[in-house]
Amino acid sequence: MIVLSKTPSKKIFHSTLEMLSLDKDVASTFQPKATESVAARQQTFDGAFNGQEYFYPLIIASIGLTVFLVTVAVVLVRKHRIKREDSANKASSILVYPSQQGSLQPQFLTKEIHFSLPPLRSTSLGDLHETEQDSDVDIETESLLPTTQHNQRSHSFSCYGLGVIEPALYKNTLDLDDIQWPDGHIGRIWFSLRYEPSTEKLLVSLLKAKNLPSRTLGTVNSCDPYVRLHLMPDERRYLQSKQKKKTCNPYFDETLVFHVSPKDMSDHYLKLTVIDGGRTKRRAEIGHVTYLLKELEIGDGSEQQLFKLDLEKETTEIRSDLGELLISLVYNENLCRLTATVIEARRLKFQGDKHEAYVRLTLNQHYKSVKEKRTRVVRSAQESVATFTEGFNFKLTPSQMDITSLAFHIFQSTSGYDKLIGKCVLGSYMFARGKALIHWNTAMANSMEQSQQWHVLCE
């Protein structure tokens, strides 16, 4: 039998109680620290949550601002491009003058026009020699020509090919206000010619006319013109264009066809007469131009030749009582030099007893004096004859022939102010008519050949 002692058990019990009380103290010591840790974690989580609440709206606002800036940049670029295209279109706009719809004001067309140039050949228009030719254009004129009788007409641009615009026909018409028409000018006509040897057809394309005289003084539309074409010397055979109403600058835009044999081409000439249909029969004819058919370059019959000629009236040779002047012209094409020789004057009308005279030569271009020269003073012999025999040289290029004139003024030399006896003017269509024009054209066409002729003096 075992006897347990009470003393050790009591000690164990007391030690256990002490340990339990110690654990409570420890627990009470660490419990506030744990509570503080949990509160700190909760506060950190709440702060992080509040930061995310401001971060996402900031990103959305940045994206929206970027899209707005890109949109503004695209709009500005498009506006700049449209403005540049508009300025380019305005720079390449075409001035149409006058309007064919009845308006007399210039119109600007900014629509782009695509066209191709047919081959051309010009013999009378100096300002059309520089027209570019497009070798790729295939002009089929046979199918566009009228197939019936010779008095039929078609659209004038059919000679160039369907859908083709020929800008050379309207060159130098944009600055009509800058043209200085000479005194007594009665109009200018534009037309083109083409001859087809295979079909023996002569195609005359009437284009336009400018500066026709008006029936009413001070107006620009009192004219109803049309053109009548004769194949001279047969005056009974003619064709006629359509009449244009109330215009001094008509656009005809018609093609008329003559049947002409190659033999008749050598001895016939074409006469174009402009007539005002609103006038009486006695004053209906405004003026006319003529062209020798033998001077037309035929070729293969596919080339169009353009012409612009000033109208002239039928004039009868009038014998003047002021006297006559014998003039000689020689043109050197290689040196671009015109030599004018004043040979003799006869039947001069002097006043007083002092019969002495001299001649002043004036070279004009565009109605402006370029060069002026004069002969010596010569005493007149019997029957009012004065012999000068003096030559003068003037520089004249082929491109200046159509804008140049040479005026001869005869003065009576006196002790005071010299008195003008008479004058004569030689030059192109713009300045001269009749014998003066023929003399000038003959000298210009035959280089190094002397051409002399008597010219009647006028006041």
Image: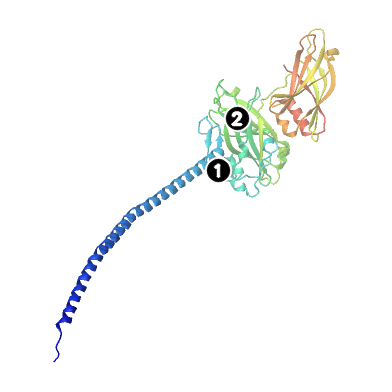
Residue 224 picture location, percent across and down: 55, 28
The answer to whether residue 125 is visible is: no
Circle 1 packing at 10 Å, graded few (<14), some (14-19), many (20+), is few
Label 2 crowding class (10 Å Cα cut-off): few <14, some 14-19, many 20+? few
**Mark 1, residue position:** 113
Against 105, residue 203 (above or below) is below
What residue lies at 56% left-to-right and 35% top-to-bottom?
95
Question: Looking at the rendering, which quadrant does residue 29 occupy?
Answer: bottom left
Left or right: where 59 falls relative to 285 = left
Q: Nearer the viewer, residue 261 or 241?
A: 241
Disc 2, SS? helix
Position of residue 213 measured from the top left corner of the image (x, y, whole percent): 60, 24
Q: Quadrant of the N terminus?
A: bottom left
Residue 457 percent across, percent down from the top left: 75, 18
- In this view, the residue farthest toward the top is 353
- Quarter holding the C terminus? top right
Circles 1 and 2 in contact, beta carbons < 8 Å:
no
User: Mark 1 falls on what kind of element?
Assistant: loop
- Name the side, left or right, on which 192 lies relative to 10: right
Residue at the image point whose x is 64% and y is 25% from the top: 185
Question: Which residue is tagged 2?
Answer: 176
At label 1, which amino acid type do we have? Ile
> Label 2 is placed on what type of residue?
Leu
Q: Which mark is residue 80?
A: none
State the separation of the CA atoms marked 1 and 2.
Answer: 23 Å
Residue 153 sits above or below residue 188 on the image: below
Q: Please state the horizontal and vertical placement of residue 388, each as a whole percent of the image.
A: 84, 19
Residue 57 or residue 16, whichever sits in front? 16
- Which numbered disc, 1 or 2, marks the residue that appears first in the sequence? 1
- Give whichever of 80, 405 is nearer the camera: 80
* Residue 7 seen in the current view: yes
Q: Residue at x 74, y 34 (%)?
A: 398
